[in-house]
Image (cartoon, rainbow, N blue to C red):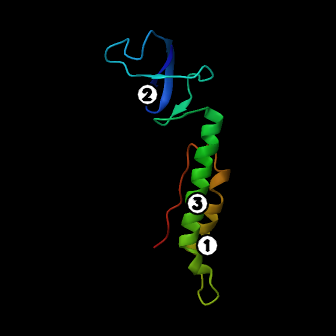
Amino acid sequence: MRAARIESGIVADLWIVPSLTAFEGVTLIEAPHDVNSGWLYDGEVFTAPAKADEKIASEARSKRRSLLAETDFHGFTDNTMTAEMTTYRQALRDVPQQEGFPNEINWPVKPS
């Protein structure tokens, strides 16, 4: 049987074992033949790293949309948006262009 040893949600290594309880103190998960070291494991599904980055990017964009929506009222015609709020909103729009996106994001701080 092919088994994966998972560390912090990532496939650390793959083993061929007679059973998932073959080694005391080691937690193994049965792994399909296409899974490799470095894949993500969320407790149910293995995900290839490229697909994982797409998922992380999608989640980051969703968070960005929510943060922008929280400040939309600043752009209504009867409100004057401060320079700080304009800068914050632009920084949110620029998140996907940050170096290291989607794995490393420097979220801008919302002005008070």
Among the two numbered marks 1 and 2 on one chain, the one whose residue lies closer to the N terminus: 2
Name which residue type carries label 2: Glu
* Residue 41 rendering spot, x and y as whole percentages: 50, 33
Q: Residues within 10 Å of mark 3 (few under 14, many from 20)?
A: many
- Which of the 4 image quarters holds residue 27? top left
Q: Which amino acid is tagged 1?
A: Thr
Discs 1/2, front: 2
Whole-percent x, y for residue 20 in the image = 41, 17
**Mark 2 or 3, closer to the camera:** 2
Amino acid tagged 3? Arg
Q: Which residue is at 32% across, 14% downward?
A: 24
Within 10 Å of disc 2 (Cα), the crowding (few <14, some 14-19, many 20+) is few
Q: Is residue 20 left or right of residue 73?
A: left
Callout 2: SS:
strand
- Sequence-wise, the earlier of marks 2 and 3 is 2
Q: Marks 3/1: CA distance?
A: 15 Å
Using the image, determine if residue 20 lies above or below residue 57: above
Residue underneath mark 3 = 64
Gap between marks 1 and 2 measured at Cα: 41 Å
Q: Nearer the viewer, residue 23 or 63?
A: 23
Residue extending farthest to the bottom is 78
Q: Is residue 76 visible?
A: yes
Could you give the CA–CA distance between mark 2 and mark 3, rounded to whole angstroms? 29 Å
Q: Which residue is mark 1?
A: 86
Q: Which residue is denoted by mark 2 in the rendering?
A: 7
Quadrant including the C terminus: bottom left
Q: Are marks 3 and 1 in contact (CB under 8 Å)?
A: no
- The percent position of residue 67, horizontal first and vertical second, equals 54, 65
Residue lying at 65% horizontally and 62% vertically, measured from the top left: 93
